[in-house]
Image: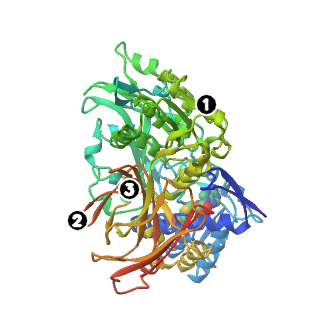
Amino acid sequence: MKIFCGRANPTTGSMEWLEEGEDYDYHQEIARSRYADMLHDKDRNVKYYQGIRAAVSRVKERGEKAIVLDIGTGTGLLSMMAASAGADFCYAIEVFKPMANAAVKIVEKNGFSDKIKVINKHSTEVTVGPDGDMQCRANILVTELFDTELIGEGALPTYEHAHKYLVQEGCEAVPHRATVYVQLVESRRMWSWKKLFPVHVEAEDGEKILVPPSEMENCPGVPSVCDIQLNQMPSSDFSTLSDVVTMFSVDFSKPVQSASTYYRVQLEPVKSGKAQIVLSWWDIDMDPSGMINCTMAPYWVKPTSALQWRDHWMQCVYFLPREEPVLQGEKLYLTACRDEYSVWYSLQKAREGGKNAGEEENKADVCVESPVCRCRAHLLWNRPRFGELNDQNRTRQYIKSLRKVLKTDSVCLCISDGSLLPVLAHYLGAKQVQCMQPTRIDLSHPHELQQAFFKANHLEDKIKIIEARPELLKPSHLEDKKISVLVGEPFFTTSLLPWHNLYFWYARTAVSPHLASNVTVLPQSASLHMMIVEFQDLWRIRSPCGTCEGFDVQTMDDMIKDSLNFRESKEAEPHPLWEYPCKSLSDPQEVLTFDFTQTVPQHCLSTEGSVKLLRKGKSHGAVLWMEYHLAADISVSTGLMQLSDEQGNCEWNPHCKQAVYFFSSVIESEIQSDPTAVTYAINFDTKTGEITMDFKL
Ligand code: SAH
């Protein structure tokens, strides 16, 4: 079987479909999966074990045999817990073949083969009866099918089916119940992930205000969940407008309905403000008494929560369809709508009037439709990109540099996806402005958003969109003029790793024949920076587990390691480091520079060297990021923003993902003594646009 994997080519900016072997997908799945992170989640594991023991005891006390159904067994962990707790038999269901195979091996290695039957099927395909997969229905239902949004991985339909066909009435469920909590907040920072704020520009002829198109104002956005490590959001970045409220709960020991529905709670703001965001998280009670509770509550709700780090379950940020001013003490209704897989929220004001008038009237405006982006912006810009475009500090740097380079006779071409730069260039006095969004050309309606933008600001006749790839640019596109100022943020939606935005350099090379001899390129250059760090927690996702609650899960460790080394060349991975604290162990170092005033060279750019380690700590890996030098003395960093000297605490650009290269020898504790330096070899292959690297400790 052949698998085609889509990947953007950083030298052309367009998507390419590469044929991969059958193994590829599965290695990607395993390598990037959260299995290791789950096995490291001590709090989760301990509580599951307690819950399972309690459930087995209750069944035994009733004088029944304990027959367990474990849906989504993964490594087989929960089934092994059940077998150890005295269960008579476990049916361990796993749909993902490589995992089911691993579960068979792990179960065997731990000596549970006679008690646990691994079934490689989706639970809805499992049959019950004398000739079926299961001899009889189970009386204990164990699962861990939850994502940050609780239901996003299909827990509800799976439970619904299991109660109908696979378990007995009155079965014990571990977890017994899940509860979803919400809190209404105002947060300019989080709201800036959904909405574009007006941009103020001081131009020669007075202040100009760049406004978003009206369709954007009331656009509900997209239904995909925004899950973040809320514990990294400082309390100064939001203001809570309500207490924490229970939104809904699901009892897993009873029949579960997955059909779309809604839940509504009454709220009284504890403070007046602008309701913008609903923060949400859940907890699970492993037993009916609620004594064994595993919670995702953030630090201001549960001060010890930062101590229990996990990445497979975080917290959710939901954006209300529109900002709503609310008054302290007024009566509000918050509605959560859900379908089988996702949740969305809306807020209604209780109206004055007769008994229940508000309730009745408001039922009508309960949203049943899941949010659908009408303005296209939410389809083209992801949440961090909204945040970046709304970053006034960053915009100021671009304005300052544009002001330095633009003249009244400037002919300006902007190459970036969905950028505000063409408008800024026009306001700042460029004579002729045109723009290109080369990586969007593959899509239908690639320029609609940009057009709507220009229209909203009455610039549709002033800024021209060139619907051609850079290599197909013709003099007629430029009204037979040469480009005197070439600008880019650069930002391209197809970029995964920081250096993929170097596509700007390739585009710049392609348009070379159209550049004036004294052209100014903004940014004039870029540089790749690197720093060695010790992560507070992120290292766990790549760290072997060995044993988990006394069970040998090394088979899983080996499998993950194999998948990570699948191509024999380890790769850097993108991570948004503002969510994953780390400490610098070395100074940041500039390792490569890319001169945009010149074309991309034919030869590779490579460098070797050594970084001194200045602080004690575990060298978990190297972080790499790009900095763009816009004009003399003006640079923007997509990585490190600030470094506090004493502890080496780092502040990262909150809108960008940085590249992380993990040092497996340190994470796997093969190296005992702390090294004093790390040597590196980094190569930028100008043919592929990719960077490969190698480190020695
Ligand atoms: N139970 C393990 C693994 C949980 S991850 C543990 O707690 O450590 C969830 C697993 O469930 C994944 O391996 C996924 O492939 C599997 N899965 C999800 N829904 C399923 C379903 N309906 N039937 C079978 N397997 C399922």
Please state which amino acid type lies under the numbered disc 2: Asp
Name the front one of labels 3 and 2.
2
Tell me the residue at 55%/70% (across/down).
79
Q: Is mark 1 within 8 Å of ligand 1?
A: no
Q: Do the CB atoms of the residues marked 1 and 3 lie less than 8 Å apart? A: no
Please state which amino acid type lies under the numbered disc 3: Glu
Q: Position of residue 115 (x, y in %)?
A: 61, 76
Number of the label disc, if any, that sits on residue 479: 1
Q: Secondary structure at mark 3?
A: helix
Q: Secondary structure at mark 2?
A: loop
Residue toward you, 86 or 434: 434
Query: Tag 1 or tag 2, which sits nearer the N-term?
Result: 1
Please identify the quadrant where the C terminus is shown: bottom left
Q: Is residue 485 above or below residue 69?
A: above
Q: Position of residue 505 (x, y in %)?
A: 54, 53
Query: Which residue was labeled with disc 3?
Result: 579
Ligand 1 occupies quarter: bottom right
Number of the label disc, if any, that sits on residue 521: none
Query: Tag 3 or tag 1, which sits nearer the N-term?
Result: 1
Residue toward you, 234 or 528: 528
Q: Secondary structure at mark 1?
A: loop
Q: CA distance from mark 2 to mark 1?
A: 53 Å
Query: Which residue was labeled with disc 2?
Result: 645
Q: Is mark 2 within 8 Å of ligand 1?
A: no
Asked if residue 205 lies left or right of residue 124, the reply is left
Mark 1 is surrounded, within 10 Å at the Cα level, by few (under 14), some (14 to 19) or many (20 or more) other residues, namely few
Q: CA distance from mark 1 to mark 3?
A: 47 Å
Mark 3 is surrounded, within 10 Å at the Cα level, by few (under 14), some (14 to 19) or many (20 or more) other residues, namely some
Give the tally of numbered discs.
Answer: 3
Q: Is mark 3 within 8 Å of ligand 1?
A: no
Looking at this view, name the residue that lies furthest to the front. 517
